[in-house]
Amino acid sequence: MSLCLLALSCLGASGAIFDLDEKPGKNCTVAQFRLWTPDGSEPLKGLFILLAGWNGDGRGMANHSKWQECAQRVGFGIIGCHFKSANTQTRYDLPENGSGQILLQAIKTFGEQSKHPEMEFLPLALYGFSAGGQFSCQFACWKPLQVIAFVAVKGGVYILNPGASVDRIPAIFFAGAKDTEVRQKNIKKIFEQERGANALWCHVLEANTGHDAGRSADLARPFFEAIIKMRVPSRSPGRSGPVNLQPANESHGWACDLKTFEIMPAGSFRKPKRDSAWLPDETCAKIWQALVKGDASLPENGGSPATASTSSPQPPPASTAPGAPSAPAIAAPPSYPQKAVCAKAVDAFDPANPSKQLGQFMAGSELIIEGKDDASGMLRATFKQPNGGEIRALCRPGDLGQ
């Protein structure tokens, strides 16, 4: 086991970062973690646990400015996880087989090293993509009393333990409208089964996306914030032991009609529950509505969703001169510099020798795109390291959604 304090400042909210390598277990060959804690000596109230897809490195997600700002608002820390399994027979996404206990040990070690002794008792909110989403769901089945809520993004296999009280844990299950039919069916099946039994769960069939994280985090963060207010005591537990989480009240939430995309207070929904998604407030419901419709922009602070759809671009404005011909639509060139967040691991190439790969930026890393390299056609990107240093590299535009 090794641990290192990396930094006291990041691109997002101000805080400290620690890295930790734990001894692998019987269902994982790699177990690495990154902790971010906000500045100050106040005890933490909980932890966000963030995971990437199968064998993916999610440690960089702890560096994401929006996750840090969210964590700072609610008094949470963040742990980004990197698990690997040698094959699909010994899967790390089944935490009860070893990887879950390794995570709990890492949390305890981080608490000692970061001078947050309350950490081992803190409740958890888990967010994961693909296999990371499967881990999040299975962890909630394994340790339901420690989980505030979870968000499972486009996983393919979910196994609920008989008798587990996971159905009373608020959750979101994402599926991609362009993902495989098998994944869509598996996700819908588990949702309908448990929602019909009164689970406080939400189903999101995200328009215009396949097997990728899409805009899931843009709903996950306000969802977690609302659930934390419902379930987590206002004071940190300190060293007194596990937190007694409060039950979420279904009647205080909002219902989302899965067929009509209408949203309404939960008490106003008169159809079978399996036909509705549950969310804690109107803000989350409006974001859900925008995601399933494929709106180009998401509502902020509960505002009305944008009406423009990414699949139906708006026509250019008509000329004001009577009888004048319509001007062709010309896409405006992108403006630089601009920020980009790696949705997956992104290949980094040497600016002096574009054919030479330097390595990869981890999923969740925030890059500053300086502009286009005319010689190679790639984008000039800068990664600001937590210690103040910089890494400059070239990246393929498609990898950064450009």
Image (cartoon, rainbow, N blue to C red):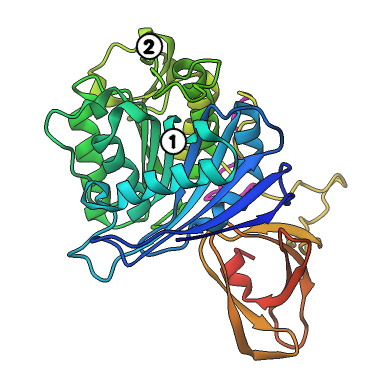
In the figure, is residue 124 to the left or right of 69?
left
Q: Secondary structure at mark 2?
A: loop
Q: Residue at x 31, y 47 (%)?
A: 100
**Which-is-in-front pick, marks 1 and 2?**
1
> Was residue 313 drawn as part of the magenta stretch in this picture?
yes
Q: Amino acid at mark 2?
A: Asn
Picture layout, residue 284 above or below residue 173: above
Quadrant position of residue 7: bottom right
Give the Cα distance between marks 1 and 2: 27 Å
Q: Quadrant of the C terminus?
A: bottom right
Picture layout, residue 373 above or below residue 26: below
User: What range is drawn magenta here?
Assistant: 303-314
User: Residue beneath label 1, please?
Assistant: 120
In the figure, is residue 180 to the left or right of 48?
left
Closer to the camera, 388 or 377?
Answer: 388
Q: Residues within 10 Å of mark 1 (few under 14, many from 20)?
A: many
In the figure, is residue 206 to the left or right of 366?
left
- Residue 249 is labelled as 2
Q: Residue at x 26, y 16 (%)?
A: 271
In the figure, is residue 346 to the left or right of 203?
right
